[in-house]
Amino acid sequence: MSGAAGPPVVGAAAPALTLPDAHGAQVAVGGPSARPVLLVFVPFAFSRVCTAELTELQAHLPELAGVDVRAVSCDPAPSLRAWAEQDGYTFPLLSDFWPHGAAARAYGVLDEVDGYARRGSFLLDAAGVLRWSVESAAGVARPFAAYREAVAGL
């Protein structure tokens, strides 16, 4: 089910939020930043498709040079920390656990019935303006080529 707000509109300011990373440090998302940000919402830590997507992102980080990758899940920070350590993710995994799904809701990707973030990705420029977004169906991985193309278009 779709969140009531819907995703932010390309060309408009993206929602500005602060979320804890897997170690509890607060990370700003949206608003002005030093570099563009690729914000990748994933439904569940340790799930097959989510793990495949983040593993592919990790393997291709050099192709996204100049962009900060941040993954967001409604899982609690300790689960995200274990997942990052197990699979070697070097980009921040941010917890949208409490208030539950607030970031996913702000970006229009919260499944309000089941309480998880759908597969939505958002590319924000350094000014915090949304430049590109994509949402993938349940169980369907987002292609890395789409990220490469979006980043090249900045």
Image: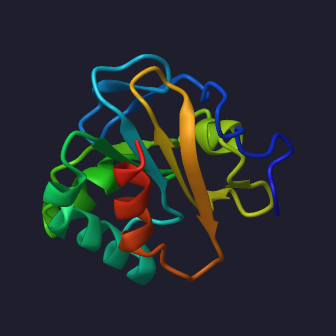
Q: Residue placed at 27% from the left, 64% from the top?
A: 57
Q: Position of residue 32 (x, y in %)?
A: 43, 16
Q: Is residue 35 left or right of residue 19?
A: left
Q: Is residue 80 left or right of residue 49?
A: left
In this rendered view, identify the residue nearer to me: 30 or 112: 30
Q: Residue placed at 55% from the left, 28% from the top?
A: 129
Relative to 57, is 35 above or below? above
**Quarter of image, res 85:** bottom left
Residue at the extreme right: 4
Q: Position of residue 54 (x, y in %)?
A: 31, 66
Q: Residue placed at 51% from the left, 41% from the top?
A: 96
The quarter of the picture where the C terminus appears is top left
Q: Residue placed at 40% from the left, 83% from the top?
A: 48
Q: Position of residue 62 (x, y in %)?
A: 13, 56
Relative to 45, is 94 above or below? above
Colour scheme of the picture:
rainbow
Q: Is residue 68 left or right of residue 39?
A: left
In this rendered view, identify the residue nearer to me: 120 or 80: 120
**Quarter of image, res 12:** top right
Relative to 18, is 43 above or below? below
**Quarter of image, res 137:** bottom right
The quarter of the picture where the N terminus appears is bottom right
Residue at the extreme top: 32
Q: Position of residue 66 (x, y in %)?
A: 22, 39
